[in-house]
Amino acid sequence: MKNLILLLKATMSGDMNIFNNKKNRKTKSRKNVSSKLIFLFFGIYLSGVAFLYANMVVEPLKSVNMTHVMLELFIVTVSILVLLECVYKSQGILFEAKDNDLLLSMPIEKKTIMVARIIKLLVFEYIFDFIFFIPAIIVYGTLENQPFHYWIVSTVMVITLPIIPTVFGSAIGYIIKIFSNKFKKGKAVQTITTIISTLGIIYFMIQFQSILSNLGNNAKNIDNLITNVYYPIKLYISLINEFNIVNFTILILLNIIISLIFIKVFSISYFRVISKSSEYAKTTKYKLTKKKNSPLSALIKKDFKKFLASPVYIVNAGFGLIIFVIATIAVSVNFEGTLGFLNKNVLMDDAGVQMQNIIQFLPIGFLSMLLFTILMSMITSSSISIEGKSFEILKTLPVSPKKILLSKVLMSNIIILIPTIICSLIISIRFNFEILMIVQIILLSLLLANFTSTLGLIVNLIFPKMDAKNDTEVIKQSISSLIATFSGMATFGIIVSICFGLILIMNMSINTIFFILIGIFSLLNICNYFVLSTYGAKKLFNI
Amino acid sequence: MIEIKNLTKTYSGNQKAVDNLSLSIKDGEIFGFIGHNGAGKTTTIKSIVGILDFEQGEILINSKSIKNNPIECKKEMAYIQDNPDLYDNLTGIEFINFIADIYEIEKEIRNEKINRFSKIFSMEKNLGNQISSYSHGMKQKIAIIAALVHSPKILIMDEPFVGLDPKAVFDLKEIMKEMCVENNTTIFFSTHILDVAEKLCDRVAIIKHGKIEKVGTMAEVKGDKSLENVFLEM
């Protein structure tokens, strides 16, 4: 226990500045304070959105006296989000930590190291819990004038909610790691199996979504399904209706027991998996170069190889692009079938969207998808941080900071543009878009990709994290990646609102909207390039 | 030539790592930089190669300021870290080619050098493997090969012999001597191995608490004593 606490202190202090000594804490830089404020702002904003959504969802449930189903839906949502995150985060945090050598050489039980890392993983999952579940608890509690025991039980539920999904996500990540270790190209296998697992979970989510149609009439079925499938939810709902010490104890013990079983089972092979992960297929063969690359190409190649060598980097940045490609192919090959599936499972018939109208709105629908995909693929938000200690190499080389920044922007652009342009051409040809529209879509893709790449880089320059213990910390748990995610969402929200305003209020044509967006993003790109070439170039080598 | 004039580097908390340090290293000279742990050797070296910014003083690389002309200065230099943090996901050959591309070395020249130095350092069989699979010594060798592939006019090394096997230490010393004699290369390196410094260096400087205590030829610095005794007396 003592070792566990020491380990947690050591690992958490780097991530959260919680246990830094007083002298360090006193030197509050402006950046430290501003990053905490940014976190707080986004947290409050998203909680506000969750609060509004909880109120929306509870409305149709009031008439059938099943408002607790709103709580159930939020618990399921948070659980799935945590599960998805943990599938690939766990691989980095559990197995690819840079302090493996240090910890494994010390008299610390391997089980203790594993527990410390799972706790570290769990702590970050509480963010989903706090942002999405607490507003739902408040909405339900105030709406139904819940007694005191409701708040106690709900507090325990907040604490225990992410545990089981974290354990299951870690178990899946564990199995993926064991499986990929058997192959020479382990990293590639790891990436592919992670993507497949994540797609599987999302497919399940979409199927689940279909039962949410007509919430008011289906509340009983939804309630039965959720409480039968996920026992902790059944316990929680029974506890908030009528407090029972036995069920309360079972709720707490269930989480502890499942966690203990996971640790007991997986700690047996934990050391072996870490050991195998650090083995490499060896070869005596190599090829001398046949051609010289320019310094810029060399930098792009280097970054590209880093991207491909990191499963968490690929999954985090490329997953949206993969979904985009799958959706494009599905719509192009089987338009009616795909739209029918979306209509049933995502749009839930309530949206009243008629199939025959969809083709008319396809360009704007495709534009929305393109916007969302590219804006959420902010690869460069980690591209400086992921250099880590080897960043010093770049500082000693005869390349200007501008060239280094340009190489990162170009690398990101290449990754984003290849699938998006191909998909744009497929959709344009399949649905006979006009030549002008095809040109506009491609131009907009270029501008969007550039905007995303340059914005991500600016954010990473302001909030670098050069001392991460693994890639997962840089890509999933750094301030720059969080800000990048939220700024991508915010930009998408603003642009979509502008577009809908222009269509509905000013009755503008889609071509005109495209021109306006091209103008907006051209200006934004000019601003970003200016910032990068002035502030960015100065800041880069001062990191 | 390297000229360091009144270099001062202060870390946060008003801790002076280097205090008004001045040194001049001539072309074709092998210059040893010796000091206790935390004396300021690495800070000085990192300031020379452009990794660290410094608030006072001037560093000139062949009459060009590292602050005002960093790219031009770096074109003439190669730097080997004390603890080589290389790109773990690249293979040895990929890393060397990356450096060679940055310095725009033609393929024939680089391939000839890669073949030569990989044989000298017994790394031919490992160039195709990922750097993450290398031992510390192997990483050091790759860093050395990558530094030598572009024939730098100035070679800056921070404790280059640490982690190398005895043959590699010998080979590196021979290469250093050859570079100075044949190409008039300036070599500036820090080391704790006083025996190597005594046998190899034309001149040495001893740094203590950020200041130069002694500088000169080996004879001038140690006199009748051994370098070790001079160092320990300080």
Image (tube, coloured by chain):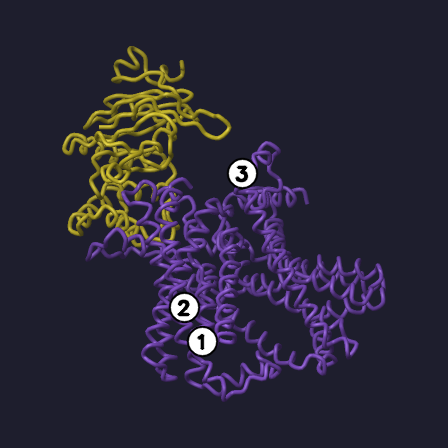
Per the model, the C-alpha gap separating discs 2 and 1 is 10 Å
Could you give the CA–CA distance between mark 3 and mark 2, rounded to whole angstroms? 40 Å
- What colour do you see for chain B? yellow
**SS at badge 2:** helix
Are the residues flagged by discs 2 and 1 from a single subunit? yes
- Judged left or right of residue A321, residue A170 is right
In the foreground, A467 or A415: A415
Classify residue A147 by image quadrant. bottom right
- Per the image, label 1 sits on a secondary structure element best described as loop
Chain of the residue that carries numbered disc 2 in the rendered image = A
Query: Which numbered tag is attached to residue A516?
Result: 2
Chain in purple, by letter, is A
Residue drawn at x 42%, y 26% is: B17
Return the residue at label 3: A29
Pointer 1 residue = A508
The first of marks 3 and 1 along the sequence is 3
Above or below for A166 versus B231: below
Q: In this view, does A104 lie to the left or right of B229?
A: right
The chain that hosts pointer 3 is A
> In the rendered structure, which amino acid carries the disc numbered 3?
Ser
Instruction: Name which of mark 3 and mark 2 comes first in the sequence.
Output: 3
Label 2 sits on what residue type? Ile
Look at the image and tell me whether residue B9 can be seen: yes
Cβ atoms at labels 2 and 1 below 8 Å apart? yes
Res B129 seen here = no
